[in-house]
Amino acid sequence: MPDPRTPKTPRTPLRRRAPLVAVLLLGGCAVAPLPPLQRDAPPAWQHAGRPVAPAPDLHGWWKTFGDAELDRLVDAALADNLGIAQAGLRIEAARLLDAHANDASLPQFGFRTYAEPTPDSSASYFQAGFDAKWEFGLFGRAQSRARTSAGDLGIAESEAQAARVSVVAEVVRAYVELRGAERRAELLEQIAAQAQRKRELLATREGLRLAAAREVAHARAEEASARAALAEPRSAIVRARRQLAALLARDDEDVVAAGAPLVLGDSAAAVDVLPADLLRTRPEIRRAEYEVEKAAGELGIAEADLYPHVGLGGALTYAARVIGHTRLSDADGIVTFGPAIEIPLFDWGARRAARDARARALQASVLAYRQAVLDGVAEAEAAMSALHERTRASRSLRDGAAALADEARSTATLQRLGLADGVEATVSESAALQAQLELLQAEQERSLAFIALYKALGGAPLPPGGAG
């Protein structure tokens, strides 16, 4: 039997240990998981058709045109474009901040001085010392800070990739428009020359009283219209060259060498990527995903602010009394160390309102993600449909242009045999040139639809290092 005189070990009442246990349990709680992201994408493209050949690489799709000058321009734009350079600097800034996202949860050290006069102003106290504070980042604070910082970094990287996608697409678009405008100018020059020849032949007929004056007047109007049509491609040439110069961060128009119009093969309409690939490549969707991560981190911080800030604190302080102007008393030092707890008690509901607002913002970001997926799928589907329709139209116009070219050759043969006059030959040749002009426009629109498709898919080279 134990000796009743032996002192018993004192026991801490449970009610006294409860606050400490509660703090430890709440501090060990992990941050809330990210909400599930619903991908409202169909299992397959509705307007992809049956691919007859592998689709171009998303990271090098413009090489389908097989134009070395275009490849050079794209490489130069990726290296020199100012928008891409700005996005790269924003990534560097986000990485610098992300590397120190949890520094607030590490021990902090500082030095301070302080002077305060006595109430009767007969002396003052001068203090100097070091202080330290270490907040533990409990209640999910550390994880939430890291999540918010990672979201900012991901957003910056997504914006950089979006800039690359846009620059590549705009370079290819401007190059296609430049080559098309140059070819249109050539065809319109030929059409104007044929109109002039027709007007001269009719004027000769009029002198021989074999044609009416109204025919000559009509031919003169056709020639004037053909000459006036040259203004559009000439303006387009200047506009495309200036746009390419701006994309390459240049101030001159001599950025493009001479070349032939681009030809897009029939297999370019093939698309064998699925919506799942779209979710991995389209930067707008990636950005929306990182926006959700950032909003979740901000919600976690707002929830952590409902609970105490727990840590350790300490200080080494020296104080001396200043009497008069120069006399100092002996400095006395004191060391303090212990727990640092900051408990919010009452703030009129401001912290809970902030938490609820962050929760609504997180819900909104999830909806924005769903909308980004839907918008991406819709844009890609529309571009696929446009590409197929433009391809079909180009094939029809190609057949019509070939037929009119055969007719022009036949008329020229009849003229050489003396079975047709020059007016008929000019009319036939003009019709063939007009058909080529329409075919060129259709091919250009088809190329632009091809560009729009791979821009919608997020096609562009990955940034250096392979991240994306």
Image: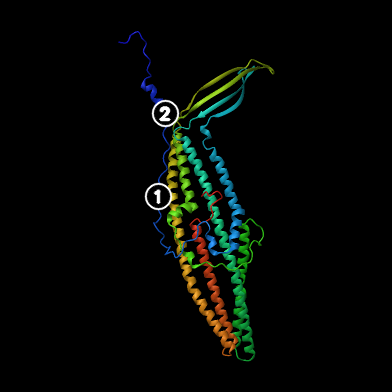
Q: How far apart are marks 2 and 1 (CA)?
A: 35 Å
x 37%, y 17%: residue: 11
Q: Where is residue 463 in the image (x, y as percent from the top left)?
A: 55, 51
Question: Does dot 2 land on a helix, a strand or a loop?
Answer: helix
What label sits on residue 38 in the rendered view?
Answer: 1
- In this view, the residue farthest toward the bottom is 209
- In this view, the residue farthest toward the top is 5
x 53%, y 82%: residue: 407
Compared with residue 73, is residue 358 higher up or lower down, i.e. above or below? above
Compared with residue 111, is residue 403 higher up or lower down, i.e. above or below? below
What label sits on residue 24 in the rendered view?
Answer: 2
Q: Where is residue 79 in the image (x, y as percent from the top left)?
A: 61, 53
- In this view, the residue farthest toward the front is 53
Whichever of labels 2 and 1 marks the residue nearer the N terminus, that label is 2
x 52%, y 70%: residue: 442
Q: In which quarter of the image is residue 189?
A: bottom right
**The N terminus lies in quadrant:** top left
Neighbour tally class for label 2: few under 14, some 14-19, many 20 plus, Cα within 10 Å: few
